Amino acid sequence: MKKIIKLTVTLFLITAIMAAALAGVNAITKDRIAAYKAEKTTKAISAVLSGGESAQEIAFDAAANPLVSKVYANENGYAIQVTPAGFGGAIDMMVGVDKAGNVTGISVISHTETAGLGSVAADSSAKGDAFRGQFVGQSGELAVGDGIDAISGATITSKAVTAGVNAALRCAESLG
């Protein structure tokens, strides 16, 4: 019985020390991670919206737009941050929509898609640029197979990105 108690206490102490160490690392890196995310978001806004540096966050109807997390606006249109569910998890992306309701660009902020397949949607490669580029100038309800070509071997990711773009277009329409 003493052996079981000793092992239990030892395991508890190891677990408590590791939890404290992880909490310490989290506290130390929290601000740096937040700054990095803010920088990536700012770059994404500038990539999808002309004059994106001047865009300000605005309120939107979150209940009517569940995939939308934030909306930024300036005189040229909207930069809408959406988070659709891909194959490997959430795809955090920024979609630019001009005042006429047309997509001006897509920038993937973060994702956990399969390397070499779904990750192509975010790549700075010819395939990635071509995939994201096919959305530019589009409006209305978009669908993979109906004007939008899927990434070979990554249909779920392609549909997720398309769902995110559709959510951004609906949100921009509701904002006027």
Image (tube, rainbow, N blue to C red):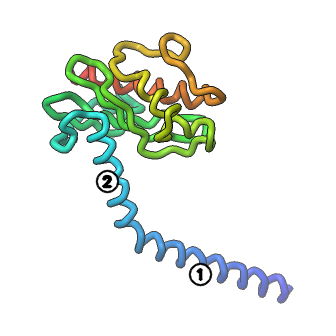
Q: Is residue 20 left or right of residue 49?
A: right
**Which badge, 1 or 2, is on the more N-terminal residue?**
1
Residue at far front of view: 126
- The residue labelled by disc 2 is 38
Query: Does 82 sit above or below residue 98?
Result: below
Residue 135 point in image, percent of width and height:
40, 22
Quick one: 38 or 170, which is closer to the camera? 38
Badges 1 and 2: C-beta atoms under 8 Å apart? no
The part of the image, by quadrant, that contains residue 116 is top right
Quick one: 64 or 117, which is closer to the camera? 117
Residue at far left of view: 75
The crowding category of the residue bearing disc 2, from other C-alpha atoms within 10 Å (few below 14, some 14 to 19, many at least 20), is few
Amino acid bearing label 1 = Ile
**Residue sitting at x 44%, y 29%:** 132
Q: What is the spatial separation of the Cα atoms under label 1 and label 2, in whole angstroms? A: 32 Å
**Residue sitting at x 39%, y 66%:** 30
Q: State the mark number for residue 17.
A: 1
For discs 1 and 2, the disc positioned in front in the rendered view: 2
For numbered disc 1, what is the local secondary structure? helix
Q: Quadrant where the C terminus lies?
A: top left
Quick one: 101 or 89, which is closer to the camera? 101
Quick one: 99 or 57, which is closer to the camera? 99
**Residue sitting at x 39%, y 25%:** 167
The part of the image, by quadrant, that contains residue 96 is top left
**Residue sitting at x 20%, y 37%:** 58
The part of the image, by quadrant, that contains residue 39 is bottom left
Q: Is residue 77 left or right of residue 159?
A: left
Amino acid bearing label 2 = Ala
* Number of numbered discs on residues: 2
Residue 124 point in image, percent of width and height:
46, 41
Residue 100 point in image, percent of width and height:
22, 17
For numbered disc 2, what is the local secondary structure? helix
